[in-house]
Every structure is written in structure tokens, then in C-alpha cells.
């Protein structure tokens, strides 16, 4: 009987050494979320003490004693719960400051000790990403796109991946990274950018229309641009033509004024005079007739 008890005690010691000797179990959570620190032992529990270590500082967070759970740190008040007789700790409404090492020390009714540690990392929520079309080229009936996915966050823990599908078919993985080059053909293509960190993920969708639709839209856009250009520039062109016409007309009018023709017109004018014209028989009473030349301007 003594040998059996000795073997049992040795097994408990080995179990304790195994538990306390390994590295803390990694856990992840996101802001405003919750996480469960779980440790089950097959024996009745008398006491459970939870400690929290962060930035070199260690302190007791909560304890479970005589079937009663109490919180000992103010920043965790109203955010901690326990289950399984204090061996499981639930942290709700997580914050970035909750990241650190949590250690539980459990004593059973036989006063045997069990210990377990957890390394909790709390991440920010991933904002909804945005997909932007950086470039579009049409070549031989094929439409090539460059798509860029981004989120307003400077976290280095983010990873990007892309998936695609035609119509309502299943999604297929396309590539990793924030930027992709992809082509659309004769069917609409739905692309999804998935951004994640170890605790949270978010996505955005971008639909590439069929290439034939894009080509038709481009033709319509060029036609509309031409119509707009004609509507905008037409009045100015007409005004310019009218100004040129008026300029030419005025120039011709000025030239006609300078280009004059002088004509000589002779006519007889009878004037009273006291002079007499001698004749063979003596003096004549007929007045002296003479000619005058008058010049007038004739406009062509």
C-alpha cells in the first residue's frame, strides 16, 4: 500500500513539473472580444489563484477559494468570470492592455499544486479594407486590371489574400499580398480582398464587369465626350467664323474707299459776258462761249 501511495505522489510531482516547466500556451484575442483561459484537472479544487504579468510587473488578478470567486485588480472588475471551480478564467471586453502572461496556481483538496501559464496577445479589430482600381488596360479584347487593397492601420501583423469567383460559383484562392494583377474576359468577375490578423479579419468585394461591357462603355464615353466637346466648342467656333467674316468684310470696304477712279466730264456752260466776238461784218452780239472741265469722284 505504501508503494502505491508513493507512486501516486511521484506522479503528481511529475505532472506538476511537466505543467510548470513548459512555455506559456499562446492565446489571441481582439479588442472588445473575449477569451477563455481553460485548465481542467480531474480532482476537486480547494484554491485557485490567477496572476497577471506585464512589463515586468506581476500581481494577483483573481482568486477562487471556498467556492467563492473574487476579483482583486480594479481594471478587471466586471470583466472577469470563472468556471470549473476557478480553473477556467474568462476575460470579456478585452483591451490592448490585457496582453501579457496569465498564470494559475491550483491546489486540490489534498493540497497538491498545479500550475499553468498563458501568453495572451490582444489585437485591434481589422478595419474594413478598401479596394482601388489603380490601372486598367484593354488589349486584344482582354481587360487587365491592377487592384490594390488597403486598411487604415499601421499594424505589422496584417496579412492580405485574394479570392475570386464567376457568377455564384465557389470562391477560389488567387494570390497573397495587397496588390494583384488580374484579367476579366466575357464574364463578370468578383474579387474579394481578405485582411486578417491573428485574432480578427475583415474583407471587401470588387466586381470586374465583362470585358465586352467595358469596351462598350468606353465607346459610349468617347462618343459622349465628343458630343460635349461639340456642344461646348461649337458656339465658340461659330463666333470665331463670324469674327473672321466681319474682319474680311471691313477690310474689303476700307480697300474700296481707297480705290477711286477719276473721270473727265465736259459740258458747256453759258455765262453772261461783256466781251464781243468780232466778225467779218463787224461786231457780233453773241456772247463768248467757253468750256470748263469738272472732275467728280466715281466709286466702284
Image: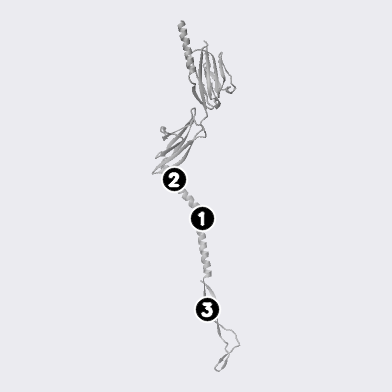
Residue designated by label 1:
236
Q: Is residue 78 above or below residue 113?
A: below
Give the image quarter of residue 215: top left
Label 2 CA crowd tier, 10 Å (few <14, some 14–19, many 20+): few
- Judging from the image, what secondary structure is the residue with disc 1 in? helix
C-alpha span from label 3 to label 2: 76 Å
* Count of numbered circles on the image: 3
In this view, the residue in front, 194 or 263, is: 194
Residue designated by label 2:
218
- Residue 211: image location, x then y, percent: 41, 41
C-alpha span from label 1 to label 3: 52 Å
In this view, the residue in front, 121 or 205, is: 121
Label 1 CA crowd tier, 10 Å (few <14, some 14–19, many 20+): few
- Judging from the image, what secondary structure is the residue with disc 2 in? helix
Residue at the outermost top position = 1
Residue designated by label 3:
265
- Residue 213: image location, x then y, percent: 42, 42
| Contact check, label 1 and label 3, Cβ < 8 Å | no
- Residue 140: image location, x then y, percent: 38, 44
Rendered residue at 55%/19% (across/down):
51
Mark positioned earlier in the residue sequence (3 or 2): 2
Amino acid at each position: 500500500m505504501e508503494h502505491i501511495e508513493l507512486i501516486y505522489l511521484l506522479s503528481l510531482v511529475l505532472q506538476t513539473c511537466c505543467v510548470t516547466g513548459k512555455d506559456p500556451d499562446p492565446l489571441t484575442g481582439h479588442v472588445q472580444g473575449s477569451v477563455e483561459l481553460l485548465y481542467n484537472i480531474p480532482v476537486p479544487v480547494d484554491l485557485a489563484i490567477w496572476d497577471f504579468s506585464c512589463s515586468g510587473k506581476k500581481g494577483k488578478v483573481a482568486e477562487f477559494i471556498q467556492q467563492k470567486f473574487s476579483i482583486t485588480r480594479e481594471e478587471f472588475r466586471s470583466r472577469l468570470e470563472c468556471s470549473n471551480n476557478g480553473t477556467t478564467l474568462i476575460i470579456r471586453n478585452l483591451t490592448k492592455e490585457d496582453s501579457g502572461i496569465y498564470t494559475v496556481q491550483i491546489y486540490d483538496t489534498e493540497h497538491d499544486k498545479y500550475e499553468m501559464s498563458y501568453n495572451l496577445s490582444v489585437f485591434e479589430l481589422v478595419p474594413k479594407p478598401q479596394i482601388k482600381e489603380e490601372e486598367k488596360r484593354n488589349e486584344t479584347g482582354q481587360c487587365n486590371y491592377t487592384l490594390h487593397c488597403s486598411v487604415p492601420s499601421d499594424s505589422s501583423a496584417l496579412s492580405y489574400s485574394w479570392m475570386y469567383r464567376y457568377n455564384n460559383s465557389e470562391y477560389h484562392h488567387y494570390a497573397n499580398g495587397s496588390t494583384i494583377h488580374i484579367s476579366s474576359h466575357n464574364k463578370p468577375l468578383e474579387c474579394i480582398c481578405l485582411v486578417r490578423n491573428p485574432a480578427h479579419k475583415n474583407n471587401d468585394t470588387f466586381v470586374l464587369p465583362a470585358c465586352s461591357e467595358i469596351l462598350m462603355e468606353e465607346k459610349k464615353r468617347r462618343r459622349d465626350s465628343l458630343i460635349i466637346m461639340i456642344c461646348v466648342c461649337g458656339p465658340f467656333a461659330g463666333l470665331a467664323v463670324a469674327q473672321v467674316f466681319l474682319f474680311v468684310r471691313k477690310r474689303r470696304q476700307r480697300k474700296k474707299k481707297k480705290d477711286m477712279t477719276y473721270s473727265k466730264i465736259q459740258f458747256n456752260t453759258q455765262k453772261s459776258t461783256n466781251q464781243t466776238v468780232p466778225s467779218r461784218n463787224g461786231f457780233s452780239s453773241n456772247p463768248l462761249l467757253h468750256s470748263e472741265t469738272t472732275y467728280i469722284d466715281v466709286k466702284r
